[in-house]
Amino acid sequence: MASYQTIGVIGAGAWGTALAQSAAQAGRSVKIWAFEPEVVEAINTAHENTVFLPGAPLNPSITASSDPSDLSDCDAFLMVAPAQHARGILARFAPHIAQGAPVLLCAKGFERESLALMTDVLRETVPHAIPAVLSGPSFAIDVAKGLPTAVTLACEDRDTGEALMEAVGSQTFRPYWSGDLVGAEVGGSVKNVLAIAAGIVEGRGLGKSAHAALIARGFAEMTRLGLALGAKRETLTGLCGLGDLVLTCSSPQSRNMSCGLALGQGQTLESVLGARKAVTEGVATAPAVVALAKTRGVDMPICAAVDAVLAGRISVDDAIQALLNRPFGPETD
Ligand SMILES: NC(=O)C1=CN([C@@H]2O[C@H](COP(=O)(O)OP(=O)(O)OC[C@H]3O[C@@H](n4cnc5c(N)ncnc54)[C@H](O)[C@@H]3O)[C@@H](O)[C@H]2O)C=CC1
Ligand SMILES: O=C(CO)COP(=O)(O)O
């Protein structure tokens, strides 16, 4: 079985930094590529990502660089830059990723312009890599602190998947193997859009019953889209689907839920996004989810309402009214 010993982490936001730390704790040699020079500097000198993951001391063996060629001796990669930057960054990395090296895709989003999943983007930019997906309920700070977390690691070849699990996993960060990449990708991407809706429900004071209904009906939307794209139902009911949906829709520490909370309380999207450096993936993914659903004839009224609110086509109150005015119907398809 393959054994990956030198891990390249592409993207040094909160999640890339936490995963770099996890791989270092698993005894791997870890190199992390950061977009911002100040992040490179902070990791190499202070052994802490003071910009995106402050308060989490890093293993001093982790080295950072802003030059993709410095990662060319890595035998496996974690792609952790936000989804909308993935194509450009992967294209830069393509010459530095060895033939047959696995690239574990950790971003949760669809590409806004092309509607591509991250596995599609990887196949188009680095066709010689083996795609894998990591997704599940796991806040970066929880993983960095060593709190218990469990995620889905999807890879068609089980041996490769298990070698990746050994490279990033630990007693507290627990990956479970799946062969269903599409399911893992759809779950993590759609839950971000639904978490914005959950935040709006909370911010508008619609109550806990509405919150539970949102999660259940949101899960029905995620399942419909997933199945239409070829996902397995059991993947969507697992960690990367329902598991992550429950976490993100219930935690104001989620960037997506907190964005919705602020919108529900009357703030504008511009003021919410302008006040944060961190990525809110659901904002760019919402129109992609809606467009993709349309191409497949899939009904996703909650995601469509979120998209319309984010795009300013409808007010929060009108979106809520429109959802409540839908005709009664069967619960399952
Ligand atoms: N933070 C978390 O708890 C988790 C995040 N994720 C996913 O990981 C992905 C990365 O998120 P985070 O690490 O949280 O990011 P972050 O919000 O902590 O940091 C923002 C990231 O965007 C990058 N960035 C900003 N402008 C850029 C540009 N013009 N070109 C290239 N990169 C640019 C920054 O370098 C940084 O890596 C997202 O898809 C997110 O959904 C998944 C699981 C947990
Ligand atoms: O994906 C996450 C937890 O599983 C993080 O969610 P946010 O990006 O909404 O903070």
Image (cartoon, helix red, strand yellow):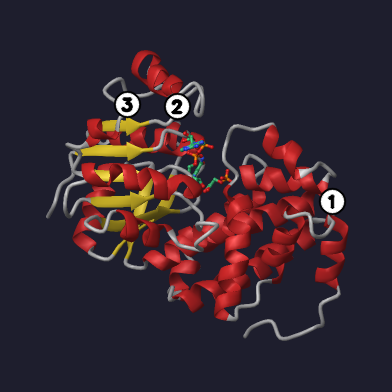
Total marks shown come to 3
Q: Could you tell me residue 73's position as x and y percent?
A: 17, 36
The one of 84 and 305 positioned closer to us in this rendering: 84
Q: Specify whether 137 is left or right of 284.
A: left
Q: CA distance from mark 2 to mark 1?
A: 37 Å
Res. 65 mark: 3
Q: Could you tell me residue 309's position as x and y percent?
A: 76, 56
Q: Could you tell me the amino acid type at mark 2?
A: Glu
Q: Could you tell me the amino acid type at mark 1?
A: Arg
Q: Could you tell me residue 301's position as x and y percent?
A: 71, 71
Residue 219 shows up from this direction = no
Q: Specify whether 313 is left or right of 187.
A: right
Q: Could you tell me the amino acid type at mark 3?
A: Ser
Q: Which residue is mark 1?
A: 204
**Farthest-out residue, left:** 1
Kind of element beneath mark 2:
loop
Above/below status of 231 relative to 113 = below
Kind of element beneath mark 3:
strand
Q: Which residue is mark 2?
A: 36
Which comes before the other along the chain, label 3 or label 2?
A: 2
